[in-house]
Image: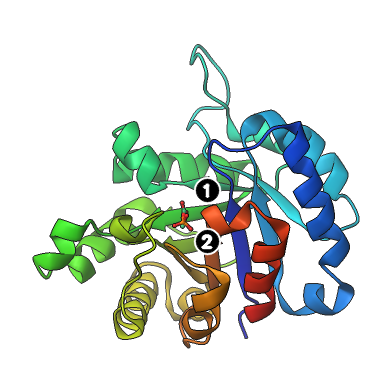
Amino acid sequence: MRKPLVAGNWKMNGTKASLNELKLLGDAYSAGLRAKVDVMVAPPATLIFVAAAGAVGTGIIIGGQDCHAKVSGAHTGDLSAAMLFDSGAKAVIVGHSERRTDHAETDADVKAKAEAALAQGLTAIVCVGETRAQREAGKALSVVAKQVKASVPDGASADEVVIAYEPVWAIGTGLTPTIADIAEVHAEIRKVIARKLGKEASAKMRILYGGSVKPENAKEILALEDVDGALVGGASLKAADFLKIIEAA
Ligand code: PEP
């Protein structure tokens, strides 16, 4: 059985005042829920240290939104996986489509970042997903398969890596693929992982869906056999909404 993971990506949103949402979430994330669903929040880097300290004892995992592939060096503005770990993060999102687009990150870059995360003992949440043009051209499955093959570290285990399928056109738009389309892509990702990492890793690896998940659609999406949780952007900013998605999982 794969324990679902509901992960919130705050992106470039949040100041110290937003930590109150984390406090509300921690208070509501009861022992009963904890036993059934893992929860992660990736606040902006400025809040990781204090968020991680505040999350102690709540069961909430604090994660980063990106990391550099190197441990240290002359890379102004960047953060290494070692720094995230040092700040209390236990996981990091890599290859989010906004990073792939805004910072021209390639699959090779994403793989190097994921490897850096694993080397520091962080769980890597590796994001993949097709653009609208790629889906309309009937290439969604092949694009995602190629990204998974090239972005996930070789030899990784199911404890180290989580995959997030996030169609680029669904992120922040309110649009979602059909339930059948989500199921089809998730099944394809599991097949690709089986070929790359073996059947056991594939059976155990969590594959999240991301892209306009909200309380209203979470239940239907999260009920799919190969959907093992969600990566949530906008709806993770308010504890009350995020909690409804956690409960749906
Ligand atoms: C995301 O950025 O990972 C995401 C899924 O955003 P949203 O939920 O806002 O579509």
Q: Which mark is residue 169?
A: none
Disc 1 on helix, strand or loop?
strand
Mark 2 surroundings within 10 Å by alpha-carbon count, few (fewer than 14), some (14 through 19), many (20 or more): many
Q: Secondary structure at mark 2?
A: strand
Q: Is mark 1 within 8 Å of ligand 1?
A: yes
Q: Quadrant of residue 130?
A: bottom left
Residue 154 position in % (x across, y down): 41, 56
Q: Position of residue 86 (x, y in %)?
A: 74, 33
Residue at 50%, 73% in the rendered image: 201
Question: Label 1 is placed on what type of residue?
Answer: Ile
| Relative to 185, residue 63 above or below | above
Quadrant position of the N terminus in the picture = bottom right
Q: Nearer the viewer, residue 183 or 170?
A: 170
Name the spot of residue 7 as percent of width and height, x first.
60, 59
Does residue 86 appear in this view? Answer: no
Would you call the spot at circle 1 few (<14 residues within 10 Å), some (14-19), or many (20 or more)? many
Q: Are marks 1 and 2 in contact (CB under 8 Å)?
A: yes
Q: Amino acid at mark 2?
A: Leu
Q: Position of residue 221 (x, y in %)?
A: 47, 80
- Residue carrying label 1: 93
Kindly identify which residue carries mark 2.
Answer: 231
In-front residue for pair 9/207: 9
Q: Is mark 2 within 8 Å of ligand 1?
A: yes
